[in-house]
Every structure is written in structure tokens, then in C-alpha cells.
Image (cartoon, grey):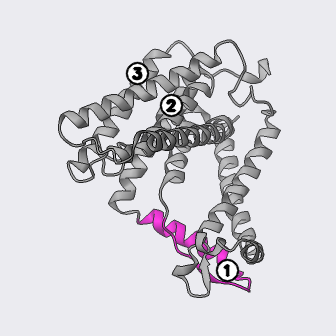
Amino acid sequence: MNKGRGVLILLMNVVGVIVVTVLLAPLAMPLVDFLSSLIPSLPRLLEAPKVPEGYNFAPVWRIVSQIVIMTFLFVSLWRMNLTSFSSLGLPFNSGWWVLLWRGFFWGFIGYVIIFGASLLVGARRFEISLSALPLLGKLFHMFVVGTVAGIWKEIIFRGMMFQAIQRCIGTTGSVLFTSLLFGTYLLPVDVKVPVGFGAIDWGVGVRGLQEHLRLLAHPGESLLTLLMVFFLMGLVLNYAFIWTGSLYFPIGLHSVWNFCDKSDRFFLNRELRWWLFGQEGIGPALFGWTALILFLCYVGVRYRSQRLHDARQSA
């Protein structure tokens, strides 16, 4: 595809996602009112106590935008004939299990090295407050949740989004763009769009867009740090997909990182050297950035002889 035409198509899709989200967002308000009468806890989940007789519409706005993005992705993939698991990067060949476990293994080893270094310099210490069985139960739950989230996000960002955008702006452009989208998606967005129950606010779609753009335009130091590390994680996962030719290796990496980041709360000292090792997990800090860049280099050397192949031929 011509580069200029590809960029134009990508921009048209981005604009389309924004416009459709803005138009559909107000129509979600009657659905929230209806569900609130059936699910008493829904207003609390929507942060209703923070807005008298109403709720924060921002989480609903994000759900609507995600549904719209998924619809655009499915249409794009259908047009490109990427309609099987194999074409999305999940071929059931003889080596898929090995790649998956290599991802788990190297993701865990990388985390152990970082955690061990933080222990050596005194940035962390063991603070296990639970007995063995409750701790094992929580760790198992975190592992299952982390694995499911890793599978889902890798299918979306690498299997679907990366390949759709790659057809428009090439591999390098897709690596950078999807890594930025991945980093933005993982940011803890604290946007407030107050609305009331019982009426449709036809301008809520525009207000939701304005508030999200305002936060991204003025992210603050903590959000910028998180965006940088999530962007680097996106680079590692994108190149793991490119160099191995499947989603199995990045799924393993992503799942283990999810698990380790959630279980870190049992061992993390939040006071010492946070700028070096991270106040909330390993990622948002200098050591985490360095480790991710080195890991990206390792993945490149380890799988330098492999490239992303067109899996549709084997589908």
C-alpha cells in the first residue's frame, strides 16, 4: 500500500473512532439508568458518591470508545482476510508451547534479576503479612488474572491492532504507534465527567473527549513516567511478536509481568529509592526502563533469524 494513502486511511479510522464514540456516548446514559435499577452496586462502581445524584460518566465513555475501536478493528481485519487464530498470530504448530513457556520463563527471570538487585541495594525488603495458604491462594488468583489479561491484550494490540496498522504505515510505524497506544491505554486515567440520572446529556460525548484530551495534554510527572515505561513495554512486546512470528512469546512475557507487578505488593518497600526502582512496581523508574531496553536487545539477538510471517498462507 502507498505510504501516503496508508497514513490517510489510518487517520480516517482514528477520526471515525472519535466521531462515532462522541455520537454514541449519550445513548449509553439510559442504559446506565436501567442497569442501576437492576444492579444496586453499579452507581458505586461508577463513582456516584463523588457526584450528588449522579455519577462519573468517564468510565462509561471509555467503555463506549473501546467497543467502537473493536468494531473498527473487526471490520479492518475482515477486509484484510485476517479471520483465523493463525492469521492473528496464534498458529497451532509444533513449537507454540515452547514459545509460550519461553515467554513465561524469561519474563520471570527478568523480574527476579530486577527484584534481586533492589534487595541488594536495600530498596526493597520482604514484608509478607499473610500466612502460607492465603498467600498461595492470592498468588494463584493473580496468576490466572494476569494470564487472561495477557492473552486478551496481546490478541488486541499485537494480533489485531498491530497488523491492521502495519498494512497502513508499515512495520516501523506500526511498532511506534501501537506502542504509544498501548502505553496510553494502560495509564491510570482519573477523568471526571459528572452527569445526573434520569436525563440524556447530548453533549456528554464531547465533554468526555475534552476531559481525556486535557489529561493527556497535561499528564504530570507521574503519568509521563508511566507512559514512558508502558511505551517501552509495548516496544518489547511488539518486537517479540515480529521476531518470533507468533503471539505465544509476548503472551508469556505479558502474563508474567502482570503477575509479578500485582504480587509485588507483598514485598515492596514504598519509601526507599523510588526514583530508581519504582514506588508502584518496577516499571515507572530508571532501573525498570534500563531493564526493558536491555531485554529488548536480548529478544532481538535471540530471535534475530526469525521474522513476522504472513500466517494467512498457513491458515
Q: Secondary structure at mark 1?
A: loop
Which residue occupies 61% across, 87% down?
53
Quarter of the image for residue 110 reads top left
Which residue occupies 66% across, 55% down?
14
Say what amino acid the circle numbered 2 marks. Answer: Leu
Question: What distance separates the C-alpha of mark 2 from that of mark 1?
Answer: 41 Å
Image position of 136 (left or right of 163): left
Q: Secondary structure at mark 3?
A: helix
Q: For the residues carrying marks 2 and 3, which lies nearer the camera in this image? A: 2
Which residue occupies 75% across, 69% down?
24
Q: Which residue is mark 3?
A: 298
Residue 145: give x, y in percent of width and height. Answer: 57, 43
- Give the label on residue 253, or none: 2
Say what amino acid the circle numbered 3 marks. Answer: Tyr
Question: What distance separates the C-alpha of mark 2 from that of mark 3?
Answer: 13 Å
Question: If the image is split into quadrants, where does the N terminus sit?
Answer: top right
Camera-side residue: 85 or 282?
Answer: 282
Given contact means CB atoms under 8 Å apart, are the residues at marks 2 and 1 in contact?
no
Question: What distance separates the C-alpha of mark 3 from that of mark 1?
Answer: 49 Å
Say what amino acid the circle numbered 1 marks. Answer: Gly
Q: Which residue is mark 1?
A: 203
Camera-side residue: 296 or 105?
Answer: 105
